[in-house]
């Protein structure tokens, strides 16, 4: 993720959106997750990445989004992302 951010920032972009991977019911990604083919980020791990991203992104680039959330009824993982207020408050404390 950080390498992608560096790449985009080095290309003269005006804005960037950061998005957490969500595993949603009924998707190919959900089947792969349930089969144990990958793990999702933990809360602290995500915060570490966001902190590094904020340190990497130049001040002249607009950050349009720091996180996102999937529909709670469809969310399989990461379940901590369903508490968007907690996530945003933690980001504000970085």
Image: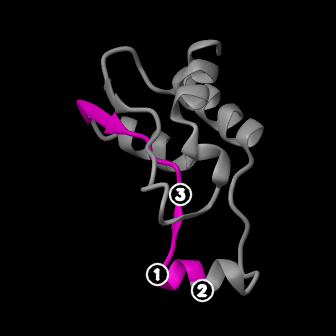
The reply to whether discs 1 and 2 touch (Cβ–Cβ < 8 Å) is yes
Mark yes or no: residue 57 visible: yes
On the rendered image, what quadrant is the C terminus found in? Answer: top right
| Few, some or many residues within 10 Å of mark 3 (<14, 14–19, 20+) | some
- Residue 17 sits inside the magenta stretch: yes
| Few, some or many residues within 10 Å of mark 1 (<14, 14–19, 20+) | few
| Mark 3–mark 1 distance (CA, rounded to whole Å) | 13 Å
Q: Which residues are magenta?
A: 13-30
Check disc 1 and report its element: helix, strand or loop.
Answer: loop
Instruction: Give the x, y percent position of residue 53.
Output: 55, 31
- The residue to which callout 3 is attached is 21
Q: 63 or 5: which is nearer to us? A: 63
Q: Which mark is residue 79?
A: none
The reply to whether discs 3 and 1 touch (Cβ–Cβ < 8 Å) is no
The residue drawn where x is 66% and y is 77% is 33
| Mark 1–mark 2 distance (CA, rounded to whole Å) | 7 Å
Disc with the residue nearer the chain's start (3 vs 1): 3
The residue drawn where x is 63% and y is 26% is 51
- The residue to which callout 1 is attached is 27
| Few, some or many residues within 10 Å of mark 2 (<14, 14–19, 20+) | some
Instruction: Give the x, y percent position of residue 61.
Output: 31, 24
- The residue to which callout 2 is attached is 31
């Amino acid at each position: 993720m950080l390498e992608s951010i560096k790449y985009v920032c080095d290309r003269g972009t005006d804005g960037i959106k950061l998005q957490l991977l969500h595993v949603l019911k009924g998707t190919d990604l959900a089947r792969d997750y349930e089969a144990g083919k990958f793990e999702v980020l933990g809360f602290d791990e995500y915060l570490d990445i966001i902190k590094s991203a904020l340190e990497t992104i130049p001040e002249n680039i607009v950050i349009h989004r720091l996180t996102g959330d999937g529909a709670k009824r469809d969310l399989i993982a990461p379940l901590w992302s369903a508490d968007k207020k907690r996530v945003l408050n933690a980001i504000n404390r970085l």
